[in-house]
Amino acid sequence: MSNPSLNKNLASLKKLDPTLYARIAPLDGSKKYEVTPSRSGPSSLSHIDSEGGKKQIHSNYDPVAEASRYLETLNIDESTNFIVLGLGLGYQVMEIIRKTPSQAKIYIFEKDPELFALAMREVDLSLIFEHPGVKLFVGVNPLGIDALLEPEQINFTLNKYCLARQKPLVEGNWEYYGILLEKIESYFQESQINLKTQSVHSKLYYKNIFSNFDSLLKSSGIASFKGCLPEVPAVICSAGPSLDKNIQLLKSARERFFLIAVATALKPLLYNGIKPDVVVSIDPDELTINSFDFSSRTNDFFLVYNPAVPNAIPRAFPNQRMAFDSEIYLANWFKKHTEEKGSLGKISSVAHAAVKFSQFLACSPIILVGQDLSFCQQRLHCLHSFYHDEHMDKVARLNPCSYWDHQKYLNFGPNLTQGTDLFGKRVSSTIAMESYSHIFSKNLGGSKNIINATEGGVPIEGVINMPLRESLHIYCKKLVKDKQNLLKTSHLSDPFKSLQDSALRQIQLLKDITKKLNALELSYLGTRAPNSEGKKLFVNEMEVLYKNILENKETALLLQGYDFAGFSEWYRSNCQILRKKEVSAGYSPLDEEFERDLKFFDVLVEATDYLTVSFEKAIA
């Protein structure tokens, strides 16, 4: 018997997602659910348990009105991005589509393919399938959703998202939807931290990368050393407060493992007479320079760094340094026009980079030390680290070191979180450190060759915990020879000519944009308060200029990377204006468009001027 709704839905689904169509088309529906007409007409849905008991999923009276009332509690008029948990018969999603702008992005997660197939047979879902912003995820593994969320990561992070749940479905399948919800929240929490970091540091990243052009040209890439320490045990030393209790164990077994120090752990190690094989630095702040002791010999160990660190750091290791590629666009531009140094993938912290580097070298096992990811008596760092020593100059009888630790602890304010340490005691952490712990778990959880020998702080989910003494006894029995010889500087190419030619072309493109900006200023911004006609012409010309900039992707990404906050604000404002245009009858956006473009004009002027001067200096 022909089913018009099913045929229409299948045709629409095939256009939207052929892969999902191939999975769903053969299914007949679900015996776990029952569809009956509601009193108002539209179909209702109930779940039938193993004993024949029924639980209503949608209202038996008016499921459409029920969905509408629920969405009113979420203030969906203020959102253009939505994540929906549980599709059911689709009423919530259809109401979202009816009440929001056409540019809305709607990500729908449904656990049960058979329930989805049943909905296809019972309800016309073409409104959902034909919406340009809809993405359907049916029966996906909640542990692997990062790749699914990535296309709208920046949009959902900057403009937020509204979370809607088909509550009876979600609560009845909490084992699935609970994990899914946790992963979604963790993903966007991490994304928010990353975007905030990028917004705050984007100009500093560019300053450092430009100043490092010469160092990068003369540095070996980590690619030359891939897999050069197979099965060699590695210790990753971070500067958490627990390092104080067992740093001497590292000294006693020093020749039986490859030692990688994060920058903040370098001074504590050197103070205790322990020289690492490698120190890793990724932080752009000038403050990170204080983690290095430039008076000590730097020929005894290697520096592994990314292009965004302050130039004083790679300059201090002229003969013993390795660079790795960064995701910052200026660094990508440098790589494209010179040579690849080698990638460690997505990096969130210096300790994460150190672990990735040890894996890159094929070390095994990898033993983590000082990776507390929490406070210990309101301290975040071990003795003799820069962050601890900075307090010592302030210590007085009435203001001991504990007083300054407390003051620093209070500065974290609303970012403080509570958790449980390795010993079951309550411990304080921060949102950022929880995010790092999540990243460690996601990347390292289940790895049999990763051992957390920190002996303090919060555990890393999925990673084996073991005392350091036991770890060294079991895994570090043999002397490790020729570590330094294996990491000898490789032959360096000389790609300066290629870099120079590319920079000259980029300078010319930037100067062309500057000419257009100058012409716009002369024509419309003499008083910075043009009349309505002047505002309209300015907005139109800015739109043309923006489209022209986008024609050269490299230039657009270089500009965006320099002032990430400025571009993000333009994007956020533009989304708000587009939403108002569609949902508010009679709305006149001219004044808001002018203010948006006036701010963006200043962003472009500063960015083009900075990049032009910096490229000229870099190749001078």
Image (tube, helix red, strand yellow):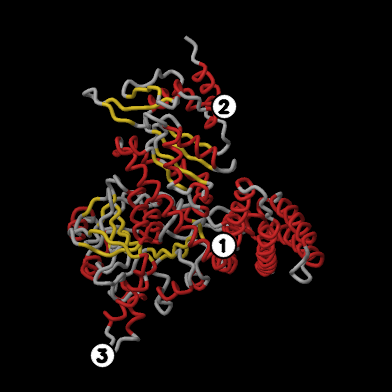
Q: Which residue is mark 3?
A: 397
Label 1: how many residues lie within 10 Å, few (<14), some (14-19) or many (20+)? Answer: many
Left or right placement of residue 325 versus residue 277 in this view: right
Which of 227/192 is in front?
A: 192
Label ID, residue 565: 1
CA distance separating discs 2 and 3: 74 Å
Q: Residue 536 or 133: which is nearer the viewer?
A: 536
| Residue drawn at the location 67% of the way across and 50% of the way down | 586
Image location of residue 146, percent across then percent down: 43, 44
At mark 3, the secondary structure is loop
Q: Compare residues 305 and 383 and report the one nearer the observer.
A: 383
Looking at the rendered structure, the kind of residue marked 3 is Arg
Q: CA–CA distance between discs 1 and 3?
A: 44 Å
Q: Which residue is mark 2?
A: 15
Spot occupied by residue 617 in the image (x, y as percentages of width and height): 67, 70
Q: Quadrant of residue 564?
A: bottom right
| Discs 1/3, front | 1
Which residue occupies 22% across, 54% down? 465
Of the two numbered discs 2 and 3 on the same chain, state the one appearing first in sequence.
Answer: 2
Mark 2 surroundings within 10 Å by alpha-carbon count, few (fewer than 14), some (14 through 19), many (20 or more): few
Q: Earlier in the sequence, mark 1 or mark 2?
A: 2
Q: Is residue 476 left or right of residue 308?
A: left
Q: From the viewer's perspective, is the residue at label 2 or at label 3 nearer? A: 2
Q: Give how far apart the Cα atoms at labels 1 and 2 are.
A: 37 Å
Q: Residue at x 45, y 24 (%)?
A: 41
Q: Is residue 581 left or right of residue 127?
A: right
Most extreme residue toward the bottom, as rendered? 397
Quadrant of residue 380 within the rendered picture: bottom left
Identify the residue shown where x is 29% and y is 38%.
Answer: 175
Q: For numbered disc 2, what is the local secondary structure?
A: helix
